[in-house]
Image (tube, rainbow, N blue to C red):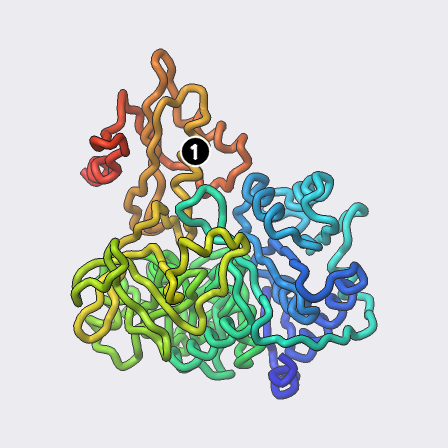
Amino acid sequence: MASVVASAGSREAFVDGDTRVTFDAFAGMVERVAGHMSSLGIAHGDVVSWQLPNWWEAAVVHHAALRLGAIPNPLNMIFRGRELRFVLAEAKPALLLVPERFRGFKHAALAATLRDEGLVPEIAIVRGGSSQAHSLAEWLAEAKPPVATKFPWANMPALLLYTSGTTSDPKGVLHTHETLLYEIRSLEKVHEITWRDRYLGGSPVTHIAGLNYGILMPMVLGTRTILMERWEPAHALELIESEKLTFQTGAPTFLQTLAADPSREKRSLGSFRLFSTGGANIPTEPIREAEAALGCLVKRAYGSTEVPTLTATSFDDPDELRLGTDGRVIGPAEMRIVGSDGADVRRGDEGEIVARSPEVFRGYRNPALNKDAFDAEGWFRTGDLGRVDERGYLRVTGRLKDVIIRGGENVSVKEIEDLLAEHPAVADVAVVGMPDPILGERACAFVAPRRGQGLSFEEMVAYLESREIAKQKIPERLEIRTRLPKTASGKVRKADLRQELRS
């Protein structure tokens, strides 16, 4: 960071509405916040959790934690009491930073409750205040003595990020400075990024892609990030024109809504050169149409929280490969397609994607999860299915994990099923994804009620809300059945339910 700040100086690093933060000013803010964190006793190896929207303050908090050798822990903004209690109990942070409120939800009040429950010793409020908590604004206004730190940075934990999977609880992914730096340097090459590039920060900075591109990349490559508090396609188009933005990353939902917005026709988008998308299977034609509408190049990529970018297409790939595949492995990364026995399948056959790469995470916060995640040779089992053709291009075809991807958010099916199974009226339940042209998937709950009982959609929603889960996880459709279709071994035949929804 220091070398980039020295060369970038008065250039802008972050733009957030009317707030424009230069590299010099940003470095000063980081020092002040790090000083106040240090005065609370936060030091090397401590976890600093933050649940913040795409605000410039999130970048300051994240880099201040890194300045102390602490481990930043961005928390998804959709997390509520249920998710936060699990994460904080496992992460054991020394500090939690939240907004006073955001989109009507009182984050500060929940944080105070979690502190009173003993899950975190200190809380700080961003864009707001409370006599019962520290204030980031006050920290920024008061200088503290510089903090002297000297650590073996490369292999130190530099990120703890929780992701949903097949289990009902989130999994804490640990990255180091080395894994994240490799990721950013590989993106620099594959996307031909220079300090002149200006990134549209519409993807949540609490996700691996939004964090890497939006918060970390400026301090490595000297790029500029223009942050969006919430995704509004018309506003995004306005920013592309007024700020002369050059590229964006995000789920297909972002790309499709950006291209479909009617205000696009009156905007000058000549600076916008690249949109990199991934994270869901979408037909080639909608991508091609979006590319033509925006006048930029669209590239596809494949990755996850554990392996941020394993494959990507290239600028010089033919259209059918650039838009119709998920690309080839980047740099020294390795990828195999294996069967259920762990052996490589024949070229072109479907199997599980396994990976080895300098950017692969170093393990989960709960080390008991590592045994199933890695094989004896260090290959990471992604849980995703794919095929690789003779030229080495990957096509992601599905997933072994029972996960619904709704607008780029992973929703653990097991978590919702486990909660609904506890409802006194529910005898059997299965949750499946139903296709959605904008969000990719939405959730549908199939429920077999207990004899003599019933369950309405409104009752289901109210029950799940009472369990304090993120509202985005609540199924948007309920189907009542006398019984659910089962295999001979007693498992629900979800393929039958998905087919029923399609027909």
The amino acid marked with disc number 1 is Asp
SS state under label 1 = helix
Residue at image coords 57%, 44%: 86
Eyeballing the image, is 383 above or below 394?
above
Q: Quadrant of the C terminus?
A: top left
Q: What percent of the width, then of the height, locates residue 316? A: 27, 81
160 up-or-down from 215: above or below: above
Front-most of residues 248 and 324: 324
Vertical position of residue 272 compared to residue 430: above or below: below
Q: Position of residue 259 (x, y in %)?
A: 34, 62
**Tag 1 residue:** 418
Residue 364 located left or right of residue 383: right
**Residue 244 screen position, x and y as percent:** 47, 76
Please identify the quadrant where the N terminus is shown.
bottom right
Question: Which quadrant would residue 127 be assigned to in this image?
Answer: bottom right
| Left or right placement of residue 409 versus residue 110 in this view | left
